[in-house]
């Protein structure tokens, strides 16, 4: 009987963790609209364990996804190093990311997103 309760308790632990993660930090985009934009996440203790893939998303949407995952800071850079980012790159699309999707998230994880004009092709 005790083993059954122990198993049930162990099964509940992941469910509790998922429920806490689903609640999120409430941290939305708090980035300035400068090209070296940064966004703060709420409590990094409520986070996913791996960096989500945000390639192909708009910068604004990528910040939201990364914030929800517990990424503390997001910086924008140009995919084409010769291109200048606009003062408000929210609509630009993510063509690259560092750290890569699937990388572990730790308390100090920060991300850099490589952005391109929405009409540009990026591989």
Image: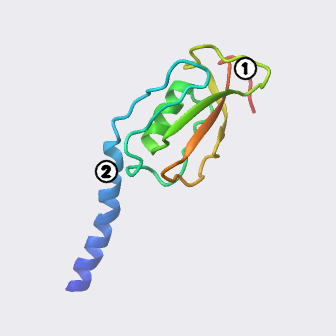
Q: Nearer the viewer, residue 37 or 46?
A: 37
Other-residue count near label 2 (Cα within 10 Å), few / some / many at <14 / 14–19 / ≥20: some
Residue at the far top in the pictured view:
87
Q: Can you give x and y, in whole percent of width and height, for residue 6 in the image?
A: 26, 78
Q: Position of residue 76 (x, y in %)?
A: 62, 28
74 lies above or below 45 = above
Residue 5 image point, x, y percent: 22, 78
Asked which quadrant contains residue 12, the reply is bottom left
- Left or right of 8? Residue 108 is right
In the rendered view, tell whether residue 28 sits above or below residue 35: below
Q: Which residue is mark 1?
A: 120
Residue drawn at the location 37% of the way across and 34% of the way down: 27
Image side of residue 121 versus residue 110, left or right: right
Q: Nearer the viewer, residue 81 or 52?
A: 81
* Residue labelled with disc 2: 20
Element carrying mark 2: helix
Foreground mark, 1 or 2, reads 2
In the picture, the quarter occupied by the N terminus is bottom left
Residue drawn at (31%, 59%) of the image: 15
């Amino acid at each position: 009987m005790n083993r059954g309760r122990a198993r049930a308790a162990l099964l509940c632990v992941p469910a509790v963790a998922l429920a806490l993660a689903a609640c999120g930090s409430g941290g939305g985009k708090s980035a300035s609209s400068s090209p070296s934009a940064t966004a703060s996440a709420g409590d990094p203790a409520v986070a996913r364990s791996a960096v989500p893939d945000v390639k192909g998303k708009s910068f604004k949407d990528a910040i939201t996804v990364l914030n929800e995952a517990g990424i503390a800071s997001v910086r924008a850079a140009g995919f084409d190093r010769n291109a200048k980012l606009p003062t408000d790159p929210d609509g630009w699309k993510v063509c690259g990311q560092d750290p890569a999707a699937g990388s572990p998230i730790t308390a100090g994880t920060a991300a850099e997103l490589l952005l391109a004009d929405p009409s540009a092709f990026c591989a």
